Image: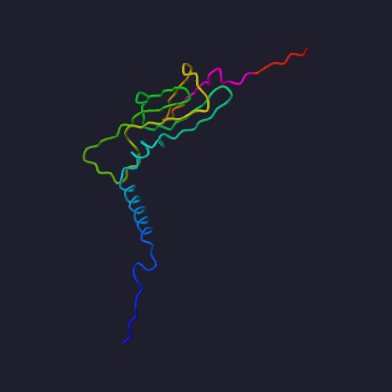
Amino acid sequence: MAIIRYPSLWSGMNPFRELERMRKEMDRLFSEVMDRSTHLQSSGVYPSLNVSQDGEQFFVQAELPGIHPEDLEISVEGTTLTLRGERKSENVEGVSYHRRERPSGRFHKALTLPHEVDSDKVEATFKDGVLKLVLPKAEHVKPKKITVRAD
């Protein structure tokens, strides 16, 4: 009868690499189990923003479906625009969810703009779940046209 030796379990395996693989797998499992909406809101990912500018002002559009304007707080300090608010959850008695992707709860997002803003002239409108902000640049950062005199 011939004896056949099988390779040892550890012969070709780096134990630290295997521990790292197991840690990554556990992280993936926990992230699927945890409420992802809370993670998105606390990480500053929510709400989605578009920011643009022209020579005179910045334009910001934020997607905020299901939010009421009275549940929003907008502030500008120096070059920082801050959006805070809360989307209230719909608590229905006797219902179990099969899937819940719409986030609820408080959110906070701060955005640094390239230039200072004249906070007294900021305009905000809210329609169909989209917040639109017009933020005029401060006078001292606007481009100045200099005329040249001929002597």
Q: Is residue 127 magenta?
A: no
Q: Is residue 142 magenta?
A: yes
Specify the farthest residue to the top. 151
Q: Quadrant of residue 111?
A: top left
Q: Residue at x 35, y 75 (%)?
A: 6
Q: Residue at x 50, y 31 (%)?
A: 51
Residue 37 spot, x, y in % from top left? 35, 40
Q: Is residue 16 above or below residue 87?
A: below
Instruction: Read off the magenta span.
Output: 133-144
Q: Residue at x 38, y 62 (%)?
A: 14
Residue 83 spot, x, y in % from top left? 40, 28
Residue 87 spot, x, y in % from top left? 33, 31
Towards the viewer: 151 or 38: 151
- Please give left or right for residue 68 compared with residue 58 in the image: left
Residue 44 spot, x, y in % from top left? 40, 35
Q: Is residue 21 above or below residue 59?
A: below
